[in-house]
Amino acid sequence: MITISSISLAGGQGKSTTTLFLARLLASSGANVLVVDADPQSSLTTFLGFQVEADSPTLLEVLKKQEGVETKDGIYPTKYENLYLIPSDDALDKVQDYLSSSGRGALTLGRRLKTVSSLFDYCLIDSPPQRSQITLTSIGASNGMIIPVEVSVKGLKSLVRTLQLINELKDEDEEFGGSIVGILPFRDRWVGLRRTKESQNNIEAMQNLSIEFLNMDLLLPTIRESEKYKQAMNQGLTLHDMGQQDLAYPIEILAGKIKHLANPAEVLA
């Protein structure tokens, strides 16, 4: 099982949206996909139309192994074929003290997921929008990381903080969190057939930051600002279902890179 975390240290950067569309694309290709909602805001759980019932295990119970809960007990099928969920709710914040006091909290999620790794091809983790113990354990569980970044000044600041955190963790253990799959610009603004000057400047700044921190340009094709993404989520459709192949292109490229991690011999398009 290849595990990928979506990391950005600010809200509104597109983590949950990216995770949702990527999961649905991989699942539609026949892969068994597990998504982990590691954000107490539970946006991904909501996007997947899942309602957490009272006394049903969530990620909190999975991480803490409360009352003998095993990882498989917190996994639920979604309404989409091949797509499964470990949900969260706002109680997940209570796990912070447990992770910080456990000694090796950054490795906890990876250990829990290892017990179900034979059941899935891919696991996608939607992490919280701040530096926290949950974010650290999400990174620690990962073979790779995606960094969604809003094409804005706020997004640039988030990217700097995220890259600083990853470099800090890599300095301690270069294998921690695996590789960065790519930086995904989100809400790229266009007017007609032209990208706005503000978006262009911010995207160029992202490229420079990627080179400065990572010594390479890992910028992916941009996700344009469009109401079609929200419409697709609200209607439970994919972008392909809506005939929006152009908008789906960045997700397709991202899926190809993740498949390449699973099978390095596969030639990327």
Image: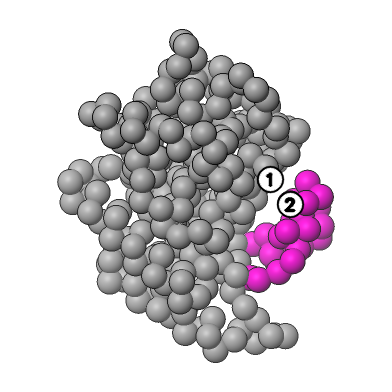
Say whether residue 158 is left or right of residue 267.
Answer: left
Q: What stretch is highlighted in magenta?
A: 224-249
Q: Mark 2 points at which residue?
A: 233
Quarter of the image for residue 48 reads: top right
The image shows residue 265 at horizontal and vertical percentages of 44, 44
Q: Around disc 1, counting alpha carbons within 10 Å, would you say few (fewer than 14), some (14 to 19), or many (20 or more)?
A: some
Q: Does the magenta stretch include residue 245?
A: yes
Q: Residue at x 52, y 41 (%)?
A: 40
Which disc, if any, is residue 123? Answer: none
16 to 12, vertically: above or below: above
Looking at the rendered structure, the kind of residue marked 2 is Met
Q: Quadrant of residue 10?
A: bottom left
Discs 2, 1 touching: Cβ within 8 Å: yes
Residue 47: numbered disc? 1
N-terminal label among 2 and 1: 1
Residue 184, percent from left and from top: 50, 63
Residue 266 visible (yes or no)? no
At horizontal 30% and vertical 54% (from top left) the residue drawn is 166
Gap in angstroms between the C-alphas marked 2 and 1: 6 Å
Say which residue appears at 47% left-offset and 23% top-offset: 62
